Amino acid sequence: MEAIQTAGSETMALATFGAGCFWGVEVAFRQVPGVSDAAVGYCGGAMENPTYQDVCTGTTGHAEVVEVEFDPEQVSYETLVELFWQCHDPTTLNRQGPDVGTQYRSAIFFHSPEQHQAAETSRTAAQERFPRPIATEITTASTFYRAEEYHQQYLEKRGLG
């Protein structure tokens, strides 16, 4: 699992999920004990340093994602993946509600072989709960580009989080 050092001796890990529009997904992950940060951004595309306007064209290959920093001693990656299945419809290809396009695809971007295996195992188990096939892609995490500051904690800033 990709570990990152933070202030002090804590070792944190990263998890990256695309579940449609990133605002509500960010709120869901921020509420999990053991999650120290959740940032919205873009992952999975070819363009370097994309803007929101770039990603909205659907031509960059990026998905709107939430990058979750968590303490694996307080919350497991498997718990985070389970929340991912619960906070969106993983059976719709390139769509969540009214949002349509590849930037809204369902995706798990793994940071280690262990995360890859856990995501695959979880997808197989989750399929039993959905009447249609799960369309979620599971792929290696590429560069995460943090979205513009006005997107960070967007719903919380508006009293909707």
Image (cartoon, helix red, strand yellow):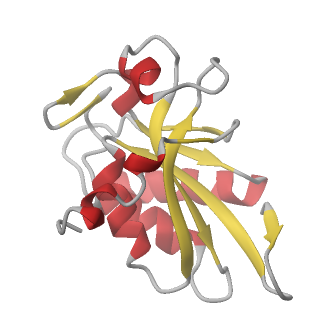
The residue that appears at 51% across and 57% down in the rendered structure is 39
Q: Check the image and report above or below for 83 versus 7.
A: above
Q: Residue furthest left?
A: 98
Which quarter of the figure is the N terminus placed in?
A: bottom right
Of the pair 81 and 38, the residue shown nearer to us: 38
Q: Quadrant of residue 114?
A: bottom right
Residue 132 at x, y percent in the picture: 22, 38
Q: Can see residue 137?
A: yes
Q: Check the image and report above or below for 80 versus 36.
A: above
The residue that appears at 51% across and 43% down in the rendered structure is 41
Q: How many marks?
A: 0
Q: Is residue 40 left or right of residue 138?
A: left
Residue 26 at x, y percent in the picture: 39, 60
Q: Check the image and report above or below for 30 versus 50.
A: below
Residue 115 at x, y percent in the picture: 67, 58
Q: Can see residue 93?
A: no
The residue that appears at 32% across and 52% down in the rendered structure is 23
Of the pair 117 and 15, the residue shown nearer to us: 15
Q: Is residue 136 left or right of residue 49?
A: left
Q: Check the image and report above or below for 45 versus 129.
A: above
Which quarter of the figure is the C terminus placed in?
A: bottom left
The residue that appears at 39% across and 48% down in the rendered structure is 150
Of the pair 139 and 128, the residue shown nearer to us: 139
